[in-house]
Image (spheres, rainbow, N blue to C red):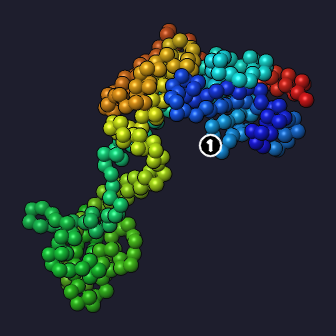
């Protein structure tokens, strides 16, 4: 089923402008996004051909089947609550039955987690992005040997430096685990390469662990080796995360992030503060304010007006206020969760009315 099918069969019962234009945060470059609600023809709804969502290729226009829409509202999904509370001048289509669904039916203390919780997830992403920008990783991946060290006097030196000074190769090394010492190994060397040592890294292997060898009992170790396994594991994880991010990042958005010199995704950070403000407003007033009264501040965030550290501090302060409001039952009158029975009864009445009149 496509959006064209919904329009041709007159199945759309709610449609509104969404995104930056609904928030009043659009710029001349902003696209127009749409969200809406549709019903399925009875023959699809009552069989296994249920379709919960229909969207265009870019997700600029998204429609939710009535049941899915109400289900997400009952979970206090921010996007769907905003959609239901959209200002009337941004609503393009509205079937009369949609008046039966109002924000107060759904708002609950769950908003603390859905609005503010999602915002905090975005802040963690912002911290991760900041770290990636400030700590780029070389494309050439480090090997396991770079995380191995051997003793020298009262300290250590890298295994690679040690081997270079000795004019030895790692393939002729043998390791035996030292009992009761974490990631510590006795290091042996076979200059004749006749003992069949496995090397520090097994020959031809991409293993993430050092190799052990069978070593004659009377052979004395030439040194002791420590493998920083935790450091190597952490490096491999960070390396993969960094280069996956490089491969998948939106280059235009990244260049914008770099251009304002603050090293955070400004658009993402703007919406993070929008969500935090909305969470605070919901808990304090029980109202969803979609068109933002704090437009100037939010656009300032988007333009890179504020330093990253200052924004993180402001976000943490807002989160503290949100938690305090959620815990203060006198200031907020929200239930712990929506009245599910009332919601289901309303959904039944809406469906019954629509299918009674829909042709």
* Residue at 85%, 22% in the rendered image: 353
The residue beneath circle 1 is 58
Q: Is residue 229 visible?
A: yes
Point out residue 36 in the picture as x, y percentages from the top left corner.
Answer: 70, 30
Please state the total of marks drawn on the protein image. Answer: 1
Q: Residue at x 68, y 42 (%)?
A: 56
Residue 34, compared with residue 90, is above or below; it is below
Q: Quadrant of the C terminus?
A: top right
The picture quadrant where one finds residue 53 is top right
Q: Is disc 1 placed on a helix, strand or loop? A: loop
Outermost left residue: 153
Q: Left or right: where does residue 348 sit relative to residue 318?
A: right
Q: Quadrant of residue 344?
A: top right
- Between 318 and 298, the one lying in front of the other is 298
Residues 189 and 157: in front is 157
How many other residues sit within 10 Å of disc 1, few (<14), some (14-19) or many (≥20)?
few
Residue ranking furthest to the front: 28
Residue 197, image x, y percentages: 30, 82
Task: Point out residue 101 in the picture as x, y percentages from the top left corner.
Answer: 71, 19
Nearest the eye: 327 or 137 = 137
Q: Residue, x 21% and y 69% (percent of image)?
A: 159
Q: Which quarter shows the N terminus?
A: top right
Residue 47, percent across and down? Answer: 85, 42
Q: Which residue is at a point 35% across and 28% down the rendered structure image?
A: 305
For the question of whether residue 72 can be seen, the reply is no
224 left or right of 357? left
Q: Is residue 75 above or below residue 251?
A: above
Left/right placement of residue 351 relative to residue 298 reads: right
Which residue is more in the foreground, 219 or 89?
89
């Amino acid at each position: 089923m496509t959006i064209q099918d919904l329009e041709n069969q007159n199945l759309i019962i709610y449609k509104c402008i969404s995104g930056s234009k609904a928030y009043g945060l659009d710029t001349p470059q902003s696209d127009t996004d749409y969200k809406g609600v549709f019903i399925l023809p009875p023959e699809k709804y009552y069989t296994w051909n249920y379709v919960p969502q229909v969207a265009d290729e870019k997700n600029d226009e998204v429609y939710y089947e009535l049941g899915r829409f109400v289900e997400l509202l009952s979970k206090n999904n921010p996007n769907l609550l905003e959609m239901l509370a959209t200002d009337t001048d941004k609503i393009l289509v509205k079937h009369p039955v949609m008046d039966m669904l109002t924000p107060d039916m759904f708002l609950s203390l769950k908003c603390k987690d859905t609005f503010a919780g999602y915002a905090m997830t975005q802040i963690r992403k912002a911290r991760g992005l900041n770290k990636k920008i400030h700590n780029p990783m070389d494309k050439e991946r480090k090997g396991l040997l770079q995380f191995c060290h051997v003793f020298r006097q009262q300290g250590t030196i890298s295994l690679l430096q040690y081997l270079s000074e000795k004019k030895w190769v790692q393939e002729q090394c043998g390791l035996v685990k030292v009992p009761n010492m974490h990631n510590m190994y006795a290091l042996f060397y076979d200059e004749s390469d006749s003992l069949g040592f496995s090397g520090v890294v097994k020959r031809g292997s991409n293993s993430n662990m050092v190799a052990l060898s069978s070593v004659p009992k009377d052979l004395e170790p030439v040194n002791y080796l420590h493998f920083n396994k935790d450091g190597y594991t952490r490096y491999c994880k960070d390396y993969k995360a960094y280069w996956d991010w490089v491969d998948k990042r939106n280059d235009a958005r990244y260049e914008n992030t770099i251009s304002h010199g603050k090293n955070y995704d400004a658009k993402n950070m703007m919406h993070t503060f929008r969500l935090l403000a909305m969470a605070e407003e919901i808990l304090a007033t029980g109202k969803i304010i979609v068109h933002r009264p704090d437009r100037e501040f939010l656009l300032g965030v988007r333009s890179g007006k504020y330093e990253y550290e200052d924004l993180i501090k402001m976000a943490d302060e807002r989160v503290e206020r949100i938690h305090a409001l959620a815990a203060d039952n006198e200031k907020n009158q929200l239930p712990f969760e929506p009245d599910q029975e009332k919601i289901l009864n309303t959904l039944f009445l809406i469906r019954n009315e629509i299918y009674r009149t829909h042709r």
